[in-house]
Image: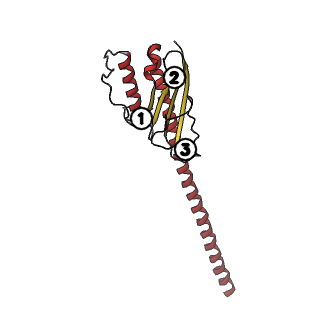
Amino acid sequence: MIMHGRNLTARRGFTLIEVMIALFVFAVGILTVAGLQIVSKKANYDAVQRTTATLLAKDIIQRMRVADDDDWDLYLVEDLGMGSLGAPGVMCDNGVSCSPEQMAAFDLYEWEQALDGVSEGNSGGLVDPSACVRGPAAGGEGTYFVIIAWRGTTELSNPVIDNGINGLGSCGAGGYDTNDAYRRVLMFTTYMSP
């Protein structure tokens, strides 16, 4: 009987160690899942920001296509974002008749409001956005570039800045210096002809 009691006690101790190991493994698993959830949320947010930037680039190109091809140069702008444009003199909505210059100023104002997330129906805009629209100086047929930069959630390797027409130059710099590893940049290129 005493021998049987010792075996019972030894088994209880061994079972307690197994339970502690199981709890440790479970805790490590829960912490790993929580870490993956955080990484997943950051990646999802970055994807939403990139999608928003793509839609905004397509939006300004569509606004330009509606305008007359002689007026496309009115849409060329540098370092737009974070409220850099004031409200236009004439709000060209609700059936108001506008000149091409007034319409371009209104379109750029609305586009900047969407970049900043101020306009209705926008899901928050971009974080710390900066943008420009480049193309032939005289407007008309040619290649147009829409460059949009914003702040991402995770650090990347330092971006290479190209000061040529296809690169950023001062466009897209926002409030960052050239070594900001959080900056994301989207360059949308399209060829427009009448």
Name the foreground residue: 169 vs 194. Answer: 169
Q: Earlier in the sequence, mark 3 or mark 2?
A: 3
Relative placement, left or right, of 1 versus 176 is: right
Q: Residues within 10 Å of mark 2 (few under 14, many from 20)?
A: many
Residue that carries the numbered disc 2 in the rendered image: 135
Q: Secondary structure at mark 3?
A: helix
Q: Is residue 27 above or below residue 189?
A: below
- Closest to the camera, between mark 2 and mark 1, is 2
Residue that carries the numbered disc 3 in the rendered image: 43
Q: Earlier in the sequence, mark 2 or mark 1?
A: 1
- The amino acid type of the residue labelled 1 equals Gly
Q: Residues within 10 Å of mark 1 (few under 14, many from 20)?
A: many
Relative placement, left or right, of 178 versus 127 is: right
Q: Is residue 96 above or below residue 16?
A: above
Q: Residue 138's mark?
A: none
Q: Secondary structure at mark 1?
A: loop
Name the foreground residue: 4 vs 83. Answer: 83
- The amino acid type of the residue labelled 2 equals Gly
Residue that carries the numbered disc 1 in the rendered image: 81
